[in-house]
């Protein structure tokens, strides 16, 4: 579509953008769920090679998100979203034909890593595509689509793997990413053209840099707790509670359903509440969830506790990314990338940390450590806003 458009919250914009989020989430969840198993069973990687490969994909996502986010802020465009999605499609297609650790490592770092920039780019696009009064409703709506995709994608991937193996999963993910590109091109081009580069971390005053650093640390810390808990929970269920592996799937599915429902509620709620307080509630719910999980003596208690976990994920994932865009405006692209990279950093740390904690203290204590990390994340978030520099408006919309 040529020319610029004064975009409002209409079906012509929300429909393609929501479709793009769902398709991107389906591709990410289908392929991401089985990437490790593919590396072990098909590529025959050694354990260390698997760790390096997965870390390379995450590192590629962090770098791509930073580069694309900054370029987007200088000239808002759909280009970088299309580049990230098509690169990912090419990467997944190549997994079916490329062998050897060096080649697959390069594909993971450059092409699969680029997919990690797609999610923050969608939120950066939404930041400039909608009228001010619509933005608080758009973020939770997009998050609900992402959550729905992650509720369906792993199940669809499992069916495809059992039916035809790993190749068909990656090919289906590549097709989903190509379809994502088609929906992105239906979104009207952002108006505004090239604009001056927003302040970088180097040009902000030291107190502002400190505020953003502590805020980012808070998000990274709570996601470290979340991902560490996701490793410990299956071991707790099958070991301490002596339940079957299918019960683990039940817990994660229940959490996904709650997350989707909570994201839809946030479409109505987010414009009506104080955003920093809402994020504090989400951080507190994570601490409560892990504490209850550590003390749980039955699967039923764990199942009920998924309500707190699902709501916490929805609140932090939705209100959190929008909060970064508020405190860092007008750098909406860099803000979305920074939030996404904080999540990725938590994921990178959690694998090794979970192994060390479970081996040293056991699964119950590990869940308790996750509760402590969540409390620390809440404390860091509170301190960041308690000491925020003058001129940083934390209550306005994006």
Image (cartoon, rainbow, N blue to C red):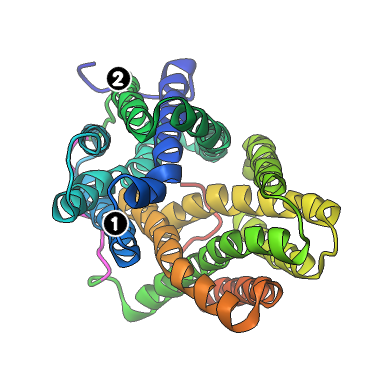
Give 364 or 163, whichever is nearer the viewer: 163
Give 159 or 205, whichever is nearer the viewer: 159
Give 170 or 197, whichever is nearer the viewer: 170
x, y percent for residue 46: 31, 62
Q: Earlier in the sequence, mark 2 or mark 1?
A: 1
Image quadrant occupied by the N terminus: top left
Please tell me whether the stretch drawn in magenta is mainly helix, strand or loop: loop
Give 181 or 205, whichever is nearer the viewer: 181
Q: Is residue 25 left or right of residue 229?
A: left
Q: Which residue is mark 2?
A: 182
- Residue 197 higher or lower than 47, as above or below: above
Is residue 227 visible in this depiction of the protein?
yes
Query: What label sits on residue 288 in the rendered view?
Result: none
Marks 2 and 1, Cα distance to the nearest angstrom?
Answer: 35 Å
Q: Residues within 10 Å of mark 2 (few under 14, many from 20)?
A: some
Q: Residues within 10 Å of mark 1 (few under 14, many from 20)?
A: some
Tell me which segment is drawn in magenta.
Answer: 193-201
Could you tell me which residue is drawn at 63 percent across and 39 percent down? 263
- Residue 108 higher or lower than 212, as above or below: above
Could you tell me which residue is drawn at 39 percent across and 79 percent down? 207
Q: How many marks?
A: 2
Could you tell me which residue is drawn at 64 percent across and 74 percent down? 366
Q: Which residue is mark 1?
A: 45
Could you tell me which residue is drawn at 53 percent across and 39 percent down? 143
Q: Secondary structure at mark 1?
A: loop
Q: Is residue 257 left or right of residue 227?
A: right
Q: Secondary structure at mark 2?
A: helix
x, y percent for residue 330: 33, 51
Q: Quadrant of residue 344?
A: bottom left
x, y percent for residue 333: 32, 48
Q: Confirm or deny contact between disc 2 and disc 1 (CB under 8 A).
A: no
- Residue 184 higher or lower than 370, as above or below: above
């Amino acid at each position: 579509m040529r020319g610029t458009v004064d975009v409002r919250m209409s079906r012509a914009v929300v429909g393609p953008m929501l479709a793009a989020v769902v398709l991107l989430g389906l591709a990410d969840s289908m392929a991401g769920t089985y990437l490790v198993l593919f590396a072990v069973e098909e590529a025959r990687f050694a354990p260390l090679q698997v760790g390096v490969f997965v870390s390379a994909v995450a590192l590629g996502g962090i770098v791509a998100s930073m580069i694309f986010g900054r370029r987007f802020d200088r000239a808002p465009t759909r280009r970088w979203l299309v580049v990230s999605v098509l690169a990912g499609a090419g990467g997944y297609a190549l997994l079916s034909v490329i062998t050897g650790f060096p080649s697959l490592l390069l594909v993971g770092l450059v092409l699969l890593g680029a997919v990690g920039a797609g999610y923050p780019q969608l939120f950066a696009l939404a930041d400039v595509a909608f009228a001010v009064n619509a933005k608080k409703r758009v973020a939770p709506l997009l998050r609900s689509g992402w959550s729905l995709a992650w509720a369906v994608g792993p199940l669809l991937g499992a069916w495809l793997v059992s039916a035809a193996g790993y190749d068909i999963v990656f090919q289906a993910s590549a097709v989903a990413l190509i379809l994502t590109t088609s929906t992105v091109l239906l979104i009207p081009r952002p108006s505004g053209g090239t604009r001056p580069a927003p302040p970088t971390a180097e040009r902000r005053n030291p107190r502002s840099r400190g505020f953003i650093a502590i805020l980012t640390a808070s998000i990274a810390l709570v996601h470290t707790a979340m991902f560490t808990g996701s490793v410990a929970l299956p071991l707790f269920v099958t070991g301490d509670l002596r339940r079957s592996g299918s019960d683990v799937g039940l817990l994660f599915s229940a959490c996904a359903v709650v997350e989707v429902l909570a994201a839809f509620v946030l479409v109505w709620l987010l414009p009506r509440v104080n955003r920093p307080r809402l994020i504090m509630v989400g951080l507190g719910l994570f601490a409560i969830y892990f504490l209850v999980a550590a003390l749980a003596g039955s699967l039923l208690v764990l199942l009920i506790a998924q309500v707190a976990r699902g709501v916490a994920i929805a609140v932090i994932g939705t209100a959190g990314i929008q909060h970064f865009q508020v405190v860092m405006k007008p750098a909406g692209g860099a803000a979305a990338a920074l939030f996404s990279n904080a999540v990725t950093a938590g994921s990178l740390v959690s694998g090794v940390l979970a192994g060390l904690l479970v081996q040293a203290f056991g699964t119950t204590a590990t869940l308790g450590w996750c509760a402590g990390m969540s409390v620390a994340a809440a404390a860091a978030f509170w301190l960041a806003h308690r000491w925020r520099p003058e001129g940083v408006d934390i209550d306005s919309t994006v």
